[in-house]
Amino acid sequence: MSGMLNYHRYGTGPTFVMQHGFLGGGGYFAPQMAALGHSFDIIAPDLPGFAGSNTQDAVNSIKAHSIAQLRLLDQLGIDKFNLLGHSMGGMVALQTALDYPDRVEKLVLYATNSSGNLPGRFETFDETAKKVESGDVNSISKYVTATWFTDYEKAPMFPFCLSAGTGATTEAVIGALNALKEWDVSKRLHELDIPILVISGDKDRSYAVDGLVQLTNTLKNAELCLLPNGAHCVHLEQADLFNATIAKFLLTR
């Protein structure tokens, strides 16, 4: 991979990396940047082939996404950082924390899990892949993104979220779906000793609550927070509560 990933950056203080998920973009963390930028130097990369990094070659493994993320941070001269990952980005974050534990100070696993086996997802990854292969990425993105909200037709942040993820290439989307199916670090969770917050909305249709509870209980030093009246993008549906929860975890624990 050549060049540098596109990224969004705002604020001053300790570095806080926020990693978007499948069909997303770093720009959808704008409400978090506005609220937390007075305490943190927030960096939100666009993963290879997604959003503003759509000129970068697509990759087909979670580890490759993690390597790309770390390469960007190296290019920016950043050694240690707090790390949040959303959905597939949570898997990337978990991979990074496992492979480079000396670099991640605190970890936020947002609406994610330690395996791509997601029995509670609104549809299988293969079903999503078939729709991508037979249609266009933009229409599939709208369909998938709609499931991230409790009621997307009434969600004021739905258009913003959809726009933030615009630009994903077909190759990146198919590569990500293949990566999700193959990825599993469940047997490595015991390696993590850093403070971890597992957080999601209580109405998430992508990652079942039971799986989040199991993930939290398996980790040594984790706490679980389920925010009310929010789905997969609770950081947009309940931004104030989400931001306050993240700030409390990072600043006081």
Image: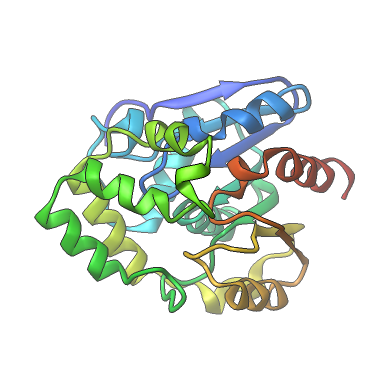
Report if residue 73 is visible in the image: no
- Against 87, residue 50 (above or below) is above
Depth check, front residue: 155 or 178:
155
- Against 57, residue 225 (above or below) is below
* Residue drawn where x is 72% and y is 28% of the image: 35
* Residue drawn where x is 57% and y is 28% of the image: 30
* Residue drawn where x is 40% and y is 68% of the image: 122
Depth check, front residue: 142 or 208:
142
Residue lying furthest left: 134
Residue 66 in percent (x, y) is at: 44, 49
Left/right placement of residue 63 relative to residue 57 reads right
Depth check, front residue: 90 or 236:
236
* Residue drawn where x is 54% and y is 62% of the image: 112
Residue 191 in percent (x, y) is at: 65, 70
- Against 127, residue 210 (above or below) is below
Quadrant housing residue 80: top right
Left/right placement of residue 231 relative to residue 7 reads right
Residue lying furthest right: 252
Q: How many marks?
A: 0
Left/right placement of residue 63 relative to residue 237 reads left
Report if residue 202 is visible in the image: yes
Residue lying furthest front: 154
Left/right placement of residue 166 relative to residue 8 reads left
Residue 5 in percent (x, y) is at: 38, 30
